Every structure is written in C-alpha cells, then in structure tokens.
Image (tube, grey):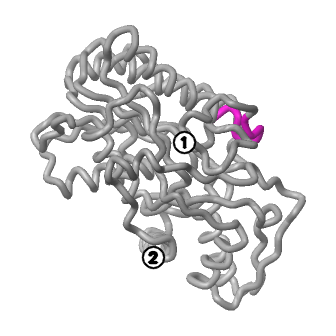
Amino acid sequence: MIELNRDARVFVAGHRGLVGSAILRKLDAEGFSQVLTATREQLDLRDQAAVNYWFRANRPEFVFLVAGTVGGILANSTRPAEFIYDNMMIHATVVHAAHLFPVRRLLYLGSSCIYPRECPQPMKEEDLLSGPLEQTNESYAIAKIAGIKLCQAYRRQYGCDFISAMPTNLYGPNDNFSLKSSHVLPALIRRFHDAKAEGRDEVVVWGTGSPRREFLHVDDLADACVFVARHYDDAEHINIGTGEDLTIRELAEMVRDIVHPDAGLTFDTSKPDGTPRKLLDVGRLHDLGWRHKIGLREGIESSYRWFLENRDRARGTEPGAAA
C-alpha cells in the first residue's frame, strides 16, 4: 500500500471531463488540500514543452492521467485521426514529464475498448492483444493500448511507479449528452428527454438492441481510482467495472421507464451494433477489496436529474481533449 496523503500534491489531468471531475469530487470529499489542475487554455497536453514546463513549475507527487478525446460510435468512426493523435500525444507528454520531474505514482486510465472484438467473456486483463479490435473504435483503442505499453516501458526502463487501469462504460454528472458524439447511455437519456419535451411517443435506438454492455457510475470509478492508486502495484493493467451487464434493449427500456414511460422503441438495424458483448472480469479488483456501490437504475435516475439541472451546458457539450 502506498501513502496517498491528504497533503500530497495531486495533479488531475483532464479535470473538466466526466472522469476528472468525479476524481476532483472524490479528492475534495477526502479532504485533499493540494489538488492541481490546468484548463485546456492554460496547458495544451499535446505540447511536450508546455507539459514539461508545467511539471517543472508545479512538481506534482501523484498524477491521475484521465484526459483524452472521447466519444461514441459515430464520433469514433468519423474522426479517427483526432482520436488517435490527440490521445497518443496526451499520454506521451504527461508520462514523459512525470518521468523527467519524478512523481511518486501515476495512474493512467484507459478503456475497455482495448480488448478484441471477439474477446472471450468476461474479458480478463491477459486478453489484451489476443485478437482484432472492433473497427468502429480502432483508432481510440490503439491509442489506449499504446498508453498501457508506454507506462510499462517507463516502468521497466526507468523504474517509474506508473500503473494502468481499464474502466468499463461510464456515465454520470458532467457526461456528454450531445447526440453527435455521446456514448450510448447519455444518448438514450437525451433522446427520450427530447421525445418527451416534443410530445413524441416513439424513440429510435441505433442497432438491433442485442449487444450486451456493462455500466459503471463515474463516482464509483473515482472511488476505485483512489483505491487502486493506494493498493495496486503491478505492471499489468487492472480492470475496473461492476462485473454485471445487460442488453442495449434492456438499457433503453430502463431509461424509458425513468425519463419517458409512455414512449415506444424502434431499433434502426441499419446502424452498427459495435462489439457484441463487453463485460470485464473484475476478479482481480474484487480480490483487492473494492466493489461498486451505485446500482444502475439509481445511477441513471441521478444522471437524469443532473441533466435536467444542467440542461443548457449538457446539450451543448461537444467532444474534445478534456482538460
């Protein structure tokens, strides 16, 4: 176990995003007094010289590397160059600076899309690079895999205490509800809300509804990240999830029941389904002593409340390198 004390200088790279903002809430709740952040205007995480200067000036002891360009199937498939370039550059600059101006520990956060499209279920950490990736998010997945390998390489060559964790599908406060770039759960919340507001009784859902997905509330992820930063010490990445999944049809029905109970569902089978199933094996995390606390229905209800309270900002959210 590593000491992550409340007076440590902790840098959250990507603090305005879904994950980074949740980690800020977690650190604040635990009483951390020296949490460091930098907006995109203050620091371009793709610029190595700028990142080096920032690390030299601020000397963080711990780093949560959760910044990145993210999006759903549409954004991933239509903007592959942005997804691979932005993410690879962000990972590279922060990891290299954390080596040059030594931090005590860096936690790099990836994504469950790193696993092969036809991966055995549930997906174990050792399944990485065991088969072809899902084509709709290949660029993003390759960038995330490169981030894992980057941390391992610096760990092996320089002895850096860099660890990696791969979360499942996330949702919660500060999510992206843009219909052009959001992930499936916030997109469903937005679609059902708009249908209700416009008096429509039918909502179109992409795909067949048959793929199975696992969902973790971002506040649970933040709790897991701090836990892993304190208790995990292995070069291999560790999965973070619930170990539970459901079909997209079941998810859409749950969102409908919460947001617009009178609506019917239509599935647009001309749109891609993506990977047939994505369920993480979280046995390693459970063995360490961590389990999720927020149930899916409870989490969707709270996410919808956040959306209603932050409607203008939530509707206008567009993708970009979170900072």
Magenta segment: does it hold 299? Answer: no
**Quadrant hosting residue 249:** bottom right
Say above or below: 122 vs 159: below
Name the amino acid, label 2: Glu
Say above or below: 116 vs 269: above
Q: Which quadrant of the rendered structure holds the N terminus?
A: top left
Check disc 1 and report its element: helix, strand or loop. Answer: loop
Which residue occupies the foreground of this view, 73 or 146?
A: 146
**Quadrant hosting residue 58:** top left
Picture coordinates of residue 59, whole percent (x, y)? 20, 23
Query: In this rendering, would 193 be left or right of 227?
Result: right
Q: For label 1, count other residues whose C-alpha is less than 10 Å away and answer few (under 14), some (14-19) or many (20+).
A: some
Q: Which residues are magenta?
A: 133-140
Residue that appears at 42% across and 49% down: 19
**What residue does disc 2 label?**
298
Q: CA distance from mark 1 to mark 2?
A: 23 Å
Residue that appears at 35% across and 25% down: 162
Check disc 2 and report its element: helix, strand or loop. Answer: helix
Say above or below: 7 vs 273: above
- Residue 78 visible? The answer is no
Q: Is tag 1's residue or tag 2's residue first in the polypeptide sequence?
A: 1
Name the amino acid, label 1: Ser
Query: In this rendering, would 153 be left or right of 272?
Result: left
